[in-house]
Image: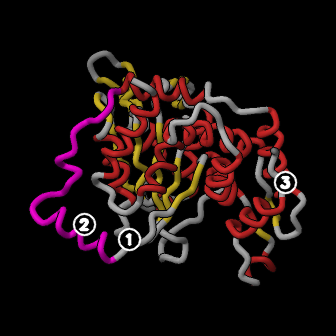
Amino acid sequence: MSHSTTANRLESAVCSVIRGQHETVRRVLACFISGGHVLLEDFPGTGKTTLAKAIAKSIRDTVFKRVQFTPDLLPSDILGVSVLDPRSQEFRFHPGPIFTDILLADEINRASPRTQSALLEAMGERQATIDGERYGFDGLFFVIATQNPVEFRGTYPLPEAQMDRFSMQCSLGYVSAAEEAAILSDQAESHPVDLLNPAVSREEIMELMEAARHVRFSDELRHYVVALVAATRSHPSIQLAASPRASLALMKVSQALALFQGMDFVSPELIQSVAADVIAHRLVLVPEAKYSGLSARKIVAELVEQIPVPV
């Protein structure tokens, strides 16, 4: 069975729960298969948490944990804590929810920056250092973080270093009236995510990840990706530009996306389709640009139009 067939089986399972969001689901799954992490920013009730649960339930033998971020959440609530065992008089480590395959960091911008930063090392280096001890994660460690727009009361904007750890930022948005009516019908008696059966195994996911790394990515496209990201560094409206981590994420997500489309090579169109999702959230605009109505996604869209595509 081809890798694209496995990828499409996973996609179909998730889309059976998340209606009317086929493109976003595919991009989020491509981010997962590329070994990255995704930030879902949207208004409450658009299906962010359901999407995370659906991905976890679609994969056999995976551990899924959820952390509800609140202002009083401490770093130890995520990483774990050492507790003194009265019998042995030794400290015994109790691992926190970060030790999992898929972690849902729900409403991440409601926690303090100190707690948010507890995820930094784990997301960037796939390890956690607790009480001087280093704990490594295996190949399957995927963080799906959700946040409500910063205008909502009681939220803390994510620091730039944390934003850079997310390979992509996506939005689900509102579905059409017909799709919303179908959602009401689906949930009349029970929630579809509760009825979802695993569509792929953990081993198949690991194979997909390996296959994505070997999708052909030409030298011309590497230079194209670098040119796109480098263009953010000389743009007059950008105060903080994208780092080489953005170039790497754009390459890896494009390779994974090619698998879902049944392609064994990456095309410029695939790169362009995810460029805004991969690059925009890493940018910090100058204050004048914000007030003039310019957004990071608009700037990336303009750069995609301007940078010559390799032939």
Q: Is residue 10 magenta?
A: no
- Residue 198 picture location, percent across and down: 26, 36
Q: Which of the two discs, 3 and 2, labels the residue nearer the N terminus? A: 2
Taking 79 as reference, is 178 left or right? left
Q: For residue 308, which numbered disc appears in the image?
A: 3
Amino acid of disc 3: Pro
Q: Is residue 192 magenta?
A: yes
- Residue 72 picture location, percent across and down: 42, 59
In the rendered image, which quarter is residue 36 located in?
top right
In the rendered image, which quarter is residue 234 located in?
bottom right
Instruction: Please name which of the two marks, 3 or 1, marks the residue nearer to the observer.
Output: 3
Residue 163 visible in image: no
Q: Specify the farthest residue to the top.
A: 88
Numbered disc total: 3
Instruction: Please state, as top left, top right, bottom left or bottom right, where the C terminus lies in the image.
Output: top right
Amino acid of disc 1: Val
Above or below residue 76? Residue 230 is: below
Q: Which of the two discs, 2 and 1, labels the residue nearer the N terminus? A: 1
Instruction: Please name which of the two marks, 3 or 2, marks the residue nearer to the observer.
Output: 3
Give the magenta range: 177-201
Q: Which residue lies under the disc numbered 2?
A: 183
Q: Nearer the viewer, residue 207 or 170?
A: 207
Q: Which residue lies under the disc numbered 1?
A: 175
